[in-house]
Amino acid sequence: MQPKSTLEDALALMRDLRARCDWDAAQTHESLRPYLLEEAHEVDEAIRSGDDALLREELGDLLLQVLFHSVLAAERKAFDAGDVANTLVTKMRGRHPHLYGDGVKEPWERMKATRRRSIVDGLPVHLPALHRAHRLQERAAGVHFDWPDTTGPLAKVAEELAEVAALVSAHPPRIAPSGSPVRDAEHERLSEELGDLLFSCVNLCRKAGVHAALALDAANAKFARRFQAVEVLARERGLRVGEVPLGVLDALWDEVKAREISAGAATRPAPPAP
């Protein structure tokens, strides 16, 4: 059985590629940025799929990017892979003073808050909006700007929803002949209020122990799965989805949803006998 490669083997391979492969030799930190983002998304897709073999492969591709940037930095005499590892170990030990010292266990965001000038320091501007909202709220919680439980966020969601409902009622959104919304002052105000509502929903998710981005991702997948089933059902009955009224689509949707719930109940284990 061939022995497994080590991280040092992977690092040596990366150095060799830089020396002997034209494409690898031409790369820079800047040119590699799109690949880093792509590989991170592919790891996320592998996790979602539940395929361990795929996850192992994609993690390797992501590791390649880490090693690539480390080798580039070493060539510039800025730092090397050992420095990256040392920084990681130092940071993780610092985050757990109760495990690697005589410190007291404390939430990480609260610990980091003492080292920041602002909650936005070091938080990438281009993070996906839902995740950025979650992280901003986590950081605010680190300086005690937070509700103790879900009661406050629930009330805030209700308040923001009422404001949106009142605005829509007073100024119904207008649609131009082209089919696009009329982007007037009222439209901008509605956009702002809806943003506040979404931000409040993210906060409610956070206080409930749910990451809003993951919850929405699951909801997207559920909607896509059910609507695809609606499309299949419509074709089986000789219906064209784009040509039937909403009431018919609603009925098909309810049928698909009922089937899915029934199938889920059938596969759920029976409760233990009393």
Image (tube, grey):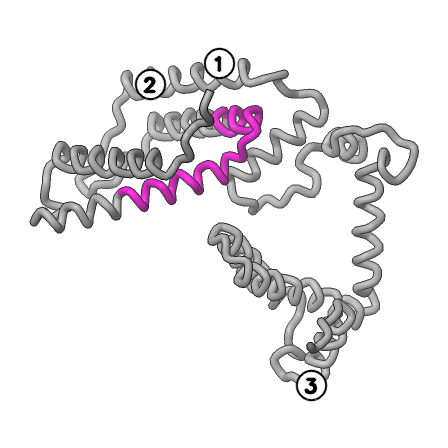
Residue kind at label 2, given as amino acid type? Ala
Residue under circle 2?
165
Q: CA distance from mark 1 to mark 3?
A: 62 Å
Q: Is residue 75 found inside the magenta-colored segment of the image?
A: no
Residue 155: assigned label: 1
Q: Position of residue 24 (x, y in %)?
A: 64, 77
Q: Residues within 10 Å of mark 3 (few under 14, many from 20)?
A: few
Q: Quadrant of residue 101?
A: top right
x 67%, y 79%: residue: 25
Q: Position of residue 53 (x, y in %)?
A: 54, 62
Residue kind at label 1, given as amino acid type? Ala
In the visual, does 199 lie left or right of 10?
left
x 37%, y 26%: residue: 190
Q: Nearer the viewer, residue 30 or 147?
A: 147
Q: Position of residue 152 (x, y in %)?
A: 54, 14
Q: CA distance from mark 2 to mark 3?
A: 63 Å
Q: Marks 1 and 3: CB-CB under 8 Å?
A: no
x 81%, y 65%: residue: 80
Q: Nearer the viewer, residue 171 or 272?
A: 272
Q: Is residue 125 above or below residue 270?
A: below
Residue span colored magenta: 200-226
| SS assignment at label 1 | helix
Residue 264: assigned label: none
Mark positioned earlier in the residue sequence (1 or 2): 1
Q: CA distance from mark 1 to mark 2?
A: 15 Å
In the picture, the quarter occupied by the N terminus is bottom right
Residue kind at label 3, given as amino acid type? Arg
Mark positioned earlier in the residue sequence (1 or 3): 3
Residue 20: assigned label: 3
Mark positioned earlier in the residue sequence (2 or 3): 3
| SS assignment at label 2 | helix
x 80%, y 35%: residue: 115
